[in-house]
Amino acid sequence: MLRALEGDGAGKTQVVVCSTCRHTSEAREDGEGLRGGARLAAALREVKAAEEGFAGVEVQDMPCLFACKRFCTIHIRAPGKVGYVLGDFSADAEAARAILTYAAAHAESEEGVVRYAHWPDGVKGHFITRTPPEGYLCT
């Protein structure tokens, strides 16, 4: 079922977290019964709240991004910009900071393309796919 975005999040760069993702290929939940995606979403919100530089990024979560072989998966998107799906993250503050740093650069970019030299180390090797915005193709 689809739910329309409302308020400030509708026009911002968004990090959509798969809330049902596993922690690792071996472990679905942690010792407290929480899934990796739920932990990653919480870490993203905590880091975002603590650092002003991430104000232009909205953190959202939804069940299942259908990338189950790539646990702790996120989708970075914004209206009219190239989007990216990334995975294989740890559900911790270090991964959250790297994701938010990349998302903030995505927000500042004209088309959603961030030069490799500006990628934080924590996102390198985590890209699964890029998605063109509706009505466009990447060249």
Image: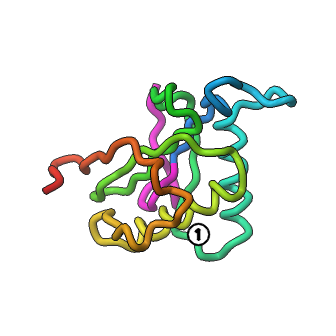
What residue is drawn where x is 27% and y is 58%? 80
Magenta span = 1-15
In the image, residue 2 above or below residue 118 = above
Magenta-span inclusion, residue 97 = no
Q: Which of 28 and 134 is in front in this view?
A: 28
Disc 1 residue crowd, few under 14, some 14–19, many 20+, Cα 10 Å: many
In the figure, residue 110 lies in which quadrant? bottom left
Residue 43 drawn above or below residue 27: below
Number of marks in the image? 1
For image coordinates 33% across by 56% down, the residue present is 79
Report helix, strand or loop for mark 1: helix
Residue 104 at x, y percent in the picture: 49, 68
Q: Name the residue under label 1.
A: 54
Q: Is residue 139 left or right of residue 122?
A: left
| Colour mode of the rendering | rainbow
Which residue reaches farthest right?
32
Q: Residue at x 71, y 50 (%)?
A: 92
Which residue is pictured at 31% across the width and 47% down the height?
130
Q: What residue type is labelled 1?
A: Phe
Residue 36 as seen in the image, left or right of residue 7: right
Q: Looking at the picture, how far across and down is residue 106, in whole percent?
A: 41, 65
Asked if the magenta segment contains residue 6, the reply would be yes
Using the image, determine if residue 67 lies above or below residue 73: above
Q: Position of residue 115 (x, y in %)?
A: 34, 70
> Is residue 88 toward the left or the right of residue 124 in the image?
right
- Quarter of the picture containing the C terminus is bottom left
In front: 135, or 7? 135
Residue 54 point in image, percent of width and height: 58, 69
